[in-house]
Image: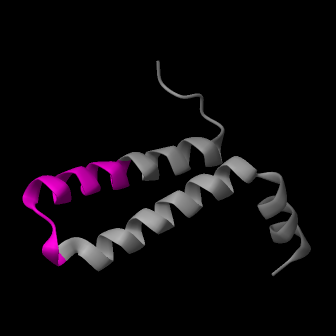
Amino acid sequence: MSPRAKAERRRNRPLREVLDELLAHTRELVRRAKEMTPAEFDYAQQRLEWLADEVWRVATGERPPG
């Protein structure tokens, strides 16, 4: 890993946190997908999309909507 990548990882804490949340949710979804009810699966998919949007917002510096 380059020194720049290490520095970015340490400086952009909000991005690191939302990426960690996205990864944790994705791992949980993969583990439980077969046993989820359709409602649980729909909610998990919506949350996955929201987290992806949040990663994009934090990475690009966009302000939250509203």
Q: Main secondary structure of the magenta part?
A: helix
Image position of 29 (left or right of 36): right
Q: Give how far across and how far down residue 44 sits, in percent.
A: 27, 56
Q: Say which residue appears at 50% left-offset and 44% top-offset.
A: 54
Q: Residue at x 39, y 45 (%)?
A: 50
Above or below residue 21? Residue 59 is above
Q: Position of residue 18 (x, y in %)?
A: 57, 53
Using the image as rendered, state which of residue 60 and residue 10 is in the foreground: 10
Please indicate whether residue 38 sits to the left or right of residue 44 in the image.
left
Magenta highlight on residue 47: yes
Left or right: 9 as drawn, with respect to 20: right
Furthest-right residue in this view: 3
Magenta span of residues = 34-49
> How has the structure been colored for display?
one colour
Q: Is residue 2 magenta?
A: no
In which quarter of the view is residue 10 placed?
bottom right
Q: Quadrant of the N terminus?
A: bottom right
The spot of residue 49 in percent (x, y) is: 35, 51
Q: Residue 6: give x, y in percent of width and height.
A: 84, 70
57 relative to 37 in the view: left or right: right
The residue positioned 57% from the left and 60% from the top of the image is: 19
Measured along the vertical axis of the image, is residue 56 above or below residue 40? above
